Amino acid sequence: MVPNESPEPLKPDYSGSAWKIRSKHRRRLLDRLTEGGDTVSVLARDVELRVPHASAEIKRLRNDGLVSSDLSAGSRGARIHLTELGWESVSADEWSRASEASPLPEDSSMCCLLFRDGPNLLLGVMEPCDSPLLLIPDRPPVSILGNSGSTGSDGVLWSWAVLREREPRWFDLSSMEPKPSPPPPSDPENIAAYSGQRTVVGIIRARLLDAERPIAIAPGQWFGSPDFRPAPPLPEGGYHRGPWVLGACHEMSPEIRPKEPVVAVMEDRLPRSMLLRTARNNSLVIADLGGLDTEGDPYPLAALDPWIERAHPRLSDAERKRRLGALKDRVSKARKVRTEDSTWRRFRQDWGESVFTEEGDSIRILDLRGLGDTAAEALVRWAINDDGKRPLTIEVGVDMPEELISSIASHSNLRMALLEGEASAFSSFDILDADPLRPLPWLRLTTRGGRVLPMRLVDPAQVPEFSESDEPVVLEWESLGIDIELVGNIEEGHLSVINSAVVQYPTGNEEWANQMEARYPIAAWIASPARTRWPRWQRLRNRLSPEWLALMNLDDLPLERLSEVADEAPDSVLEEFSKKITNRFRQDSDAALRTRPATDPKQATRGAAWVAAQLLSNAPWLPEHMHSDLLHWALEAWLSEPPSDSMPALQGVAWLYSPGRSDESSFRPILEGIRSKGKESPSGHDLHTWASLADMMLDDSKMNLDELERILELPPGWWAPISVKILSGLLEEEDSTDWVIANTVPWCAAVLRPIGDCCQAPGLRSYEHPGCDSELYSRLSRRLRGRRERQGMPDTAEPLLDLLDALDAVNDGKSPSPGKTHPLSGWLAQPLEKWPEFSSSEIMDGDVHITERLLLRSSGYHPKIVPSISISG
């Protein structure tokens, strides 16, 4: 007998509606769950509820279908998370509160407080947020009557709020529908652009840094930014007046200059390397320098004192002292001194071929790569035993003894410690770790006082080091004085000096170049030796055209400054740099760490976007730990201003999202974003061409002849699935047929593919080849046969004629005759069982695209390839 069950309560439908969540406890829990699931006890702690109250509300949420858990109800340790209905409930509440913000202001920089629950805020914005921090006034600013210069912010106190989401969610108040982005004010398709009324608002969650700060703004009140610099988000004395710059958080806040040491807890090498770039100035650095474009100094000879104590702990003090003296003599003097074999073996094991110096005061940076644990520990002990040294930036190894870690933590001159995991000795320090919402250069700073705010690293390498000059920019010169016409544009009297410089290129003459620099900048630049070319460019960049960067060897350019150089380099120079940096990345994976600029992707410059494109292009060769940064920082930075040569970057993105590395559902919105960016790009841009190809495949869009020409310049495997449609369309009209005949296109390799052959274009692999159809054969015969017999055909028509001959052979049931672009082209239309065994030399003798299909043994034959076929065995 089946027991009577009470009917399941009807679940409310929140989709497409707007209504408020009235229960304070319910709203707090749902709001917290938007950041991720967790256990009941953690959720209760985070929303400041007693566990029984939180548990009771979660039970009601579960009954309403708004939450579920990874374990059965009542199980200890179960993690609660939002269901789809729960997300709809949160959205409905937010939309309801957003509707109270009407009318929307014309000023896009304004912000609106929609709701506050303790420190948690719901804000409305009119444009994307450039910074993860916003300023909230304690009361509505009111302009002073009669004072046109007043913004109403006089006497208003401002509080700092941290955004809990990376981007706003856009919502149209007129249609009650979500939008992917706010419409531009001048959008002619937007009715609001004509009526003068804006209807799309962005909704974003935030949290006050100071939860107790009073705010007397009613929901729906819009406000702008202060016209003065408010109090900084952190105590000024402890975080803004220190001796070094760690980072920045907002344009209206001073730079973060900590007075006390900071500990960085992160496993990935990329953020550690970027932190080292920031902290190294005027500091003694002891770390793995793989991510820095610099070499370490010689090691201090005095570091052998603590080393030998660890290497020979059982020896007497006298014996250790004797061995230490002999070892120092041997490594510091160019003569062989007898040392004990066991000591020398241990030394070579820990130190390898390291070079030492007695001048310890001149040491600024020490590389731990290639050293044994005992050697690394000895260097740290040497550094902390002398309080007179510079501020210390130390990478703390996982195997370092606890007592040494405690000594580092208590050192009076410590600037920064880098750890892979938390350590109790640093529990009272300010902590830097990865920002869960934002890519590098953003990190999360948690202060000893409990404040948590995002912080953007400031890279000293991004600060220009050149001086201003009033001299006019010199006209560009295409080569090194070989073009006489351009030489004529050089100022009178400069030609002989420049010719002297050309004679000294490429070896260079530093002394002569220094003498010429003030009066003859071009000559000085040409005559610079490779090792001094970069510092000279920093001095002369305002007096030379960027075209002169063509003389810069990438090996002599600090990779940390590559994005800065790419900002001003012309496309011709960047094309050469791209080839060189590709080789560099594939030979030295650490080069990518040094090249990654400390730039917010939202504010990426042309140079940063170009560097991002190079990193994406080489994604398969970069270390696995960098892939997450590529998907977050590099992808966004690249799309901010994609270089015209962006196809390799697109292929790199497709590889990062390839099967086995990611799922198709997460790749689909990325592709749509790239496609949208491509449509905005100018004609001829790589992404515009790819977007046109995607439009043809996915939306069956029509393209003009110019767009088709650019698509057909792509690899045949990219457009092969629509090759039959393209060629059939071109053969419909006389003018387009003339174009097909006059342009060489690998038609055989594209058209003669098996049914179901996958598209090879990035992001379009789900599109399959339909196979060559009989209608194409009929059109080829009608358009080409008569012309061929009457007036002959130009050489550019050979690919078309090979395709026609291949289909003729199938139709006649004969073996194909030798093709013009490849002797074996006709076999691509024959059944595989009829293929003979081809030799390697036969396969390689002709068009490379046909060669590829032959090597793959890929036949385009199918029963309906021509109107009627008779293939005998």
Image: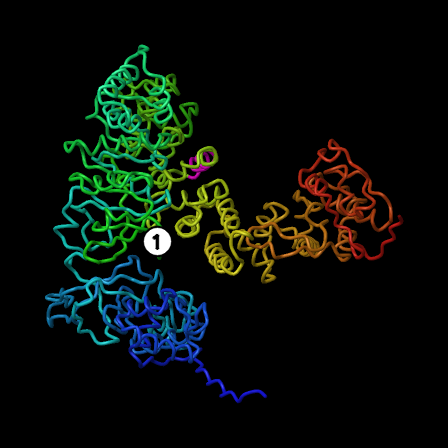
User: Which residue lies under the disc numbered 1?
Assistant: 602
Colour convention? rainbow
Residue 349, position as x, y percentages in the image:
38, 25
Point 76% across, 51% down: residue: 780
Question: Tag 1: Cα neighbours inside 10 Å, few (<14), some, or many (≥20)?
Answer: some
Is the stretch drawn in magenta largely helix, strand or loop?
helix
The front one of 539 and 582 is 582
Residue 5 shown left or right of residue 774 in the figure:
left
Q: Look at the image and tell me whether residue 123 can be seen.
A: no
Q: Quadrant of residue 467?
A: top left
- Whether residue 653 is situated above or below residue 38 in the rendered picture: above
Residue occupying image coordinates x 31% and y 76%:
52
Q: Nearer the viewer, residue 493 or 590?
A: 590
- The quarter of the picture where residue 275 lies is top left
Q: Is residue 405 magenta?
A: no
Q: Look at the image and give the residue range highlighted in magenta.
A: 571-580
Q: Is residue 25 above or below residue 617?
A: below
Q: Is residue 678 left or right of residue 382?
A: right
SS of the residue under disc 1:
helix
Q: Position of residue 723 (x, y in %)?
A: 67, 52
Can you name the residue that lies furthest to the right here? 872
